[in-house]
Amino acid sequence: MNKDLVERLLPNLPHDTKYYEEKYPKRNLGKDAIVTRYAPSPTGFVHLGNLFQLSIARKMAKQTNGILYLRIEDTDQERLVANGISKIIKTVKQFGFTFDEGPINEEEEKGKYGPYIQSKRKEIYQTYAKELLLKNLAYPDFTTKEELEQIRKEQEKTKRRIGYYGKWARSRFLSEEEIAKNLDQNKPFIIRLKNQGDFNKKITIVDAIRGKLEFPEDDIDQVLIKNDGLPTYHFAHVIDDHLMHTTHVIRGDEWLSSLPIHVNLFKTLGFEVPTYAHFSPLNKKEGNTIRKLSKRKDPELAASFYHQMGIPNQAVMLYLATIANSNFEQWYQDHEDEDIDNFPMSFSKVGTSGTLFDMEKLQNISKNILSKITAEEMYNNTLNWAKEYDQEFYDVLKNNKDKAIKTFNIERNTEKKRKDYANYSEVKSKIYYMFDELFTDPTYDFQKITDHKEIKNILNTYINNYYDQNDSEEIWFNKMKEMCDKLGYASNMKEYKQNMEKYKGNIADVSTVIRVALTSESKTPNLYDIMQILGTKTIIKRFEQIK
């Protein structure tokens, strides 16, 4: 296409492609260094699949002394959400992700290969489109929506492949005079690739995760530049990955169908094709069927869900690592005290079939992590969570710091640590009884001992004759046994099992009465520790509540 006509299509571009090739030189990195990116669109929320992709991308870049950069793909201007970029950056940062290059917020960025926001790179994309026009590898398309619909209907009727290609690509065959005439009439246009592909031929692509893949060549005249002057995703990502020198594109397998399009664009533009690595989606079992986790149906897909639940970021990242590489769990068992960044990740160990999302497994990982932190860390983390999600609980924790830390410390520093908490959101339901502000309107189930007079007799006997705040745990337990013998309950479980008819019950039944009276729960951590923290006044007050 002649220069003057091309200039009318894309006027006033200040540079040529050579300028950009020189502006963004090859990176000075080792030959095995992986340069990869996280390239979200600010049109929705960050989800678990994004975190999974990021966890692989960060690890592969870090262990090869490469680069992980953030690129914002915002060419779909109609679907953008307010402060979308800041929300993305804030969310991934909460999970411990930082980037070597990319936007810091909507206005600031770091790195020499920017702008890292696609809408700010408009002239770059148009420059490469202009070069394709000059080489007769692209053309303006004046086809209307109504005409496109007519083409689609005709293709359906004749059972042809749907798309703008071959003889169906009407604008492809316009003469320069016809193009000039359309421009004179101010007809709106887009710019399409004049595709040289042949759908009847096959291309072979080696995927880092899936191995050798075979596809028909792409022959669709793909849209390069939309009528708003911005590029399509396909065109923008190819140019950006070239100029930013991406070596590996790590993404979900929903993009596999686009792979021939992207490979064709790289080759048409004369660029080296990066290595692609397509991972499988996270799935969910629903009845007898297995389906992909859905943004619409599954709240657990949203990254924000884990903050609301109060599942520590470390647990989420550890869980994702178990999915990312099949040999990670064995490595972690052998290196439990090491940073998981020391694990040697491999693309070849990433599964190619969808993984079932396992909330129970994630919660168990979380329990294990929360059992190992100090009581003070547990307090601070729960306080921070409550400040955002539960104001009442936040106020109670803030006003009762010492009591809360002592509560979190029950059976924490033992050889076999308790694993009471799977997340911060359930802490309140497990320790509410330690605080008078939360211990309101309790209901009691004393389990095996149901006679009200007997329950009152046990409580009164204990508080009047056997309770002493200063007793050690050993003395306290011996007193409990002594009280049981006096009241007709077996203090020795072995003896009780041999002669059950001799006793009203056993020491466990009596302990349950005291436990329920104090906490309204039949199962709690160590009863002695709970009473030491509650103190004499609270114990007497709660016993008196049993009417």
Image (cartoon, grey):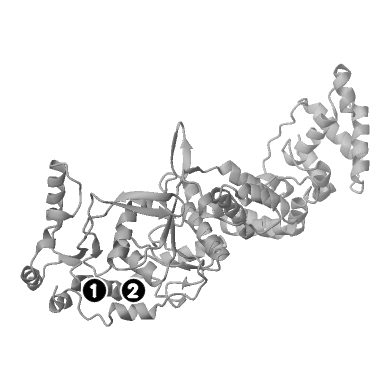
* Image position, residue 38 (x, y; %): 45, 63
Q: Secondary structure at mark 1?
A: helix
Q: Quadrant of the C terminus?
A: top right
| Residue 114, position as x, y percentages in the image | 41, 75
> Which picture quadrant has residue 64?
bottom right
Residue linked to disc 1: 131
* Quadrant of the image occupied by residue 142: bottom left
Type of the residue with mark 2: Arg
Marks 2/1 in contact by CB < 8 Å: the verdict is no
Query: Residue placed at 16% from the left, 43% from the top?
Result: 156
Give percent across and percent down for residue 22. Answer: 37, 80
**Residue 469 shown left or right of residue 545 in the figure:** right
The percent coordinates of residue 235 (x first, y second) are 30, 64
Name the foreground residue: 446 vs 141: 141
Q: Residue furthest top?
A: 501
The type of residue carrying mark 1 is: Glu
Residue holding disc 2: 121
Left or right relative to 474: residue 312: left
Nearest to viewer (mark 2 / mark 1): 1
Q: Is residue 439 visible?
A: no
Residue drawn at the location 82% of the way across and 31% of the way down:
508
Precedes in sequence: disc 2 or disc 1: 2
Determine if residue 192 is in view. Answer: yes
Q: Nearer the viewer, residue 361 or 527?
A: 361
